Image: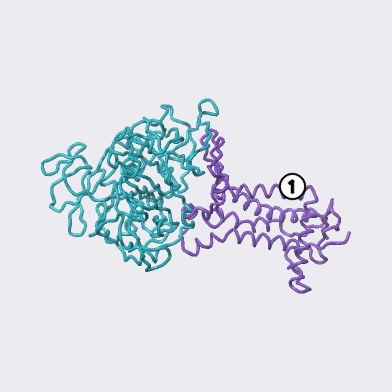
Amino acid sequence: MVRVLSGHRPGGDLTMPAGEDTGRRKPPPPRTAPIGWLGSLFARTGVAVRGALGRRDGRAVLLAATGLYLGTYLWALRHLTLSGTGGVDVFIVDDPVRTALIRRSPFLFEPVAVVEAGAIVYLLSPVNVAIGLALGLLVGATLAVSVVSWRGPDACRIGAGAGTTAGLPGLLSGVACCGPQLLVVIGAQASAGLVAALQWMVPLAVASLVGTLLWVGSRVRIDPA
Amino acid sequence: MSYTRRGVLGSLAGGASGAVAGCLGRSRDPPEDGSAVTGTPEPTPGSQTSDEPLVDLGVPCTGPEGVVDLSGGRPATEFERAAATPTAEYADGEIPLRETALHLGHELTKLADHDMSGGVNHDGIPSIDAPRFARGDEIELPGCARVFGVDLDGDVRAYPQRILVRHEIVNDVIGGEPVAVTYCPLTGTAQGFYRGGVEFGVSGQLVNSNLVMWDRHRDVRWSQVAATAFEVGDQRGSDDGGLLGRSLREFRLFWTTWNRWLSRHPDTLVMTEETGLARNYNRDPYGSYGPPVSGHYAPGEPRRPNFPLLTYDEADEKRVVVGARTPDGAVAFDKRALMESSVLTGAIGDTPVVAVADRELAVGYVYANPEGVEVEPDGDEYAVDGRTAPPDGLPLDRLDAFDAMWFAWYGFYPDTDRVGI
């Protein structure tokens, strides 16, 4: 039995259902109508996330994972690079609001500023920061629940790596941003299918991250307080 | 357009200032001899004994890296010697075209069939539509930095490769003519086109790994290397404007280095990084022309180009050729061979052609030579039929020519005459 102390929130502890003490088991099959089961799944996941974030270690994992993911995502977009000249330079476009909404490829939006400081060059694209933050929060929430579960009295082996793996397409979306540059870097032969697939990486990342989070949530049983 | 760039381009620590390697896209210590504007001249061809690959120039370039400062700038209209206001009248949407279309190595429909997405939308790679310039003595660039130079009726300008690699097209007015300065990093092709009453943008599509431009007036797709319209939007066969198969009029863009261009044209203007867009011009996403040469630009890369080619030739695909095509055919000269021998001969169809090297700029010119007159090097000039002429002024009919990676040229012109390849 894994107990995730819900800390500041009423609503009970999070525990693994009996006999569900290993991540190798499948989630429990729906016992009600699909919609009801799905609603229950979301509710349980919500409780699991709130419970995990009610603890200090859960919050720490969320913040660290989100920050790390966001940074990696911006690096994959090449919005964050170590190509600075050693000086300090700031450039802001004329019309940042209009510019921020210009879409260059399916999930790549126009930067509104260049910030150069030392070796770091950062292109600020507000919409891409929002996309990276949203993906990072999904990764962070999944990892928070997983890690908190791992730290319970009995390891339930939810699989802390699941969230990270699910976030991989989001990172790949970054390298799909700039036309052929990724293919040049990795030496892949382009095809219409591959180019199209790269453009679906962000939706794929969202779907896989939400799926992973729900899977983690489905492994948690809420014991009445 | 106003700009809000606040730069502290000076040093942060003891003079170790922002010495970006303009050729490398990486920060390096500045050379002790300081600014590279008047940096160490490149060695003359043949004087180089290092292993430096002779890539795009056909001659070595081992000048020092140096500080890059392409900040500031103003519209070309503010420079007295620039003819930056159109003097020719063009109707909206009107494009100056060649009377006779250029030769194509493939059926037009085949180009359309092989038109594929490079992964970005129309204008996903944004063109520069309001370029700003500085005088050559107001900027700093390493001697080896690649620039694309143009001289139209005495209006002389240079477009740094480090900027064009992020935009690929500049819609400008040079010598009173609306023009498009274009560059495709994947195929190593820099070409100039007269654009009349339209603006060109980057379509996001590629044919033979090469830039496909779109005319923003009616979404006609133009292949850069072929300089020919092959598709209207996504509507195969649609040709409301009667442009399919027609070819653009071209002017020469010189692929050379900053040192060489400045030596030839001390009064040149230079496009600056004040493009109005937030971009990182310190880093070339495809590689570096160096020195050292790396990434996609490196010769001897064992892998094939990333995007499908209509026709492919195994022979040293990244070698640079000087190519020319007319309505009758195409010819390609190995650039290194041309720089070493100064004169090479070939043919387009049944017409003999001659290529000569301009060793100062490290560029080649191609002339139709139907009479087969003798052309001999004479110092930096050429003796033609008893007269001496500079490489760009032989008393022959000069053809539109430009540098290209061999794989790209052969992809478009498998029937090309090949000289030294």
For this rendering, which residue is in front, A108 or A102?
A102
Residue furthest top in the image: B14
Residue lying at 20% horizontally and 55% vertically, measured from the top left: B347
Task: Name the spot of residue B239 as percent of width and height, x first.
Answer: 36, 66
**A154 or B105, which is in the foreground?**
B105
Relative image position of residue A183 (x, y in whole percent): 48, 55
Q: Residue at x 53, y 42 (%)?
A: A93
| Label 1 crowd bin: few (<14), some (14–19), many (20+), radius 10 Å | some
- View extreme (right): residue: A225
A173 up-or-down from B113: above or below: above
Q: Residue at x 83, y 62 (%)?
A: A222
The chain letter of the cyan chain reads B
A60 sits to left or right of B71: right
Query: How many callouts does the rendering have?
Result: 1
Q: Is residue A93 left or right of residue B50?
A: right
The tint of chain A in the picture is purple
Label 1: which residue?
Answer: A60
Q: Secondary structure at mark 1?
A: helix
Q: Amino acid at mark 1?
A: Ala
Chain on which label 1 sits:
A
